[in-house]
Amino acid sequence: MSFPINRPRRLRQNRTIRRLIRENSVSVDDLVQPLFVVPGNNVKAEIGSMPGQYHLSVDQAAKEASRISSLGIPAVILFGIPEKKDNVGSEAYAENGIIQKAVKEIKKSAPDLLVITDVCLCEYTDHGHCGVVKDKQVANDPTLELLAKTALSHARAGADIVAPSDMMDGRVGAIRNALDDNGFNNIPILSYAVKYASAYYGPFRNAAGSAPRFGDRKGYQMDPANAFEAIREAELDIDEGADMIMVKPGIAYLDILNKIKQKFGRVTAVYQVSGEYAMIEAAGKMNLIDRKAIIMETLLSFKRAGADFILTYYASEVAGWLSKIS
């Protein structure tokens, strides 16, 4: 029976009813804060392409991590900008590399905070690509050894979770084997299983100095036109030992996020990337949008689509908002 017996508006008529029947919500438990770590001491420099985000030296990253932990946020993910770069990204897996040092200090300052490390070479190579380059091509198999070395070095430094983002074939298996063979069988892998060759990454590449010096990343990151390919990528990573999988970017790929969650039912993350952040910030600065409402609505859309947790540059700010609500 339809109208006038059925009136959906009955369940929307006031805020308390809406709260009672709400299907999805965002909590502080859903949030992961990205941090950019740079060489030096006492460095906290705002990133031009990402206003409100900062390059932090190890000491400042440890201080910020302590603050983030105090807000109840469960995790950070670290991206490193090394002092020097070379063609094989050797600082990525150096024992005393920027991320390795940051992990150790953060675990001292915020022992209960989960430290996730991004495992990739693009920030560390002088050519800006995510792997070993041979004849102007990114060579897949030689890259696997370096990625495994990087993940292992992060685990040895004290990382709680390693997150390969390179999109090389077979990298999850290579990392899983390296971790297990060296006694780190309990370290989970959060795989960037579905990472598109997206225009949304521009501000991050500026922040990390990781733009390719030639060509692009379309030979290894996914074509934005493809949806079913995402299922295959996620399936392969799960088969190789990924404990959690990620979809990146977020807002333009909600359909993909939902497909992946529905298909596999695994712990699934989404990354609200730098371009998404920068657009909200630009529109907010021009007073074209209700900034806070847009941020919360966007995060809610990720949860509705199936995300178990969200990597977002808004994590600490949103955690502050949520604490005032509670």
Image (cartoon, rainbow, N blue to C red):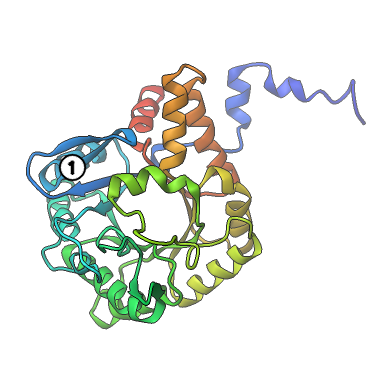
Residue 139 screen position, x and y as percent = 39, 77
Work out which residue is located at the far right of the displayed protein and give it: 1
Residue 32 visible within the image? no
Looking at the picture, which amino acid does disc 1 mark?
Leu
Work out which residue is located at the far left of the displayed protein and give it: 41
Q: Residue at x 31, y 48 (%)?
A: 75
Quadrant holding the N terminus = top right
In screen coordinates, is 50 left or right of 14? left
In screen coordinates, is 265 left or right of 187? right
Quarter of the image where one finds residue 162: bottom left
Above-or-below relation of 46 to 310: above
Above-or-below relation of 199 to 284: below
Above-or-below relation of 182 to 31: below
Quadrant holding the C terminus = top left
Quarter of the image where one finds residue 160: bottom left
Residue 24 visible within the image? yes
In screen coordinates, is 283 left or right of 61? right
Quarter of the image where one finds residue 140: bottom left
Q: Which residue is mark 1?
A: 56
Q: Residue at x 49, y 30 (%)?
A: 296
Q: Residue at x 34, y 59 (%)?
A: 213
Of 18 and 132, which appears nearest the observer?
132
Residue 130 screen position, x and y as percent = 35, 65
Q: Residue at x 36, y 46 (%)?
A: 204
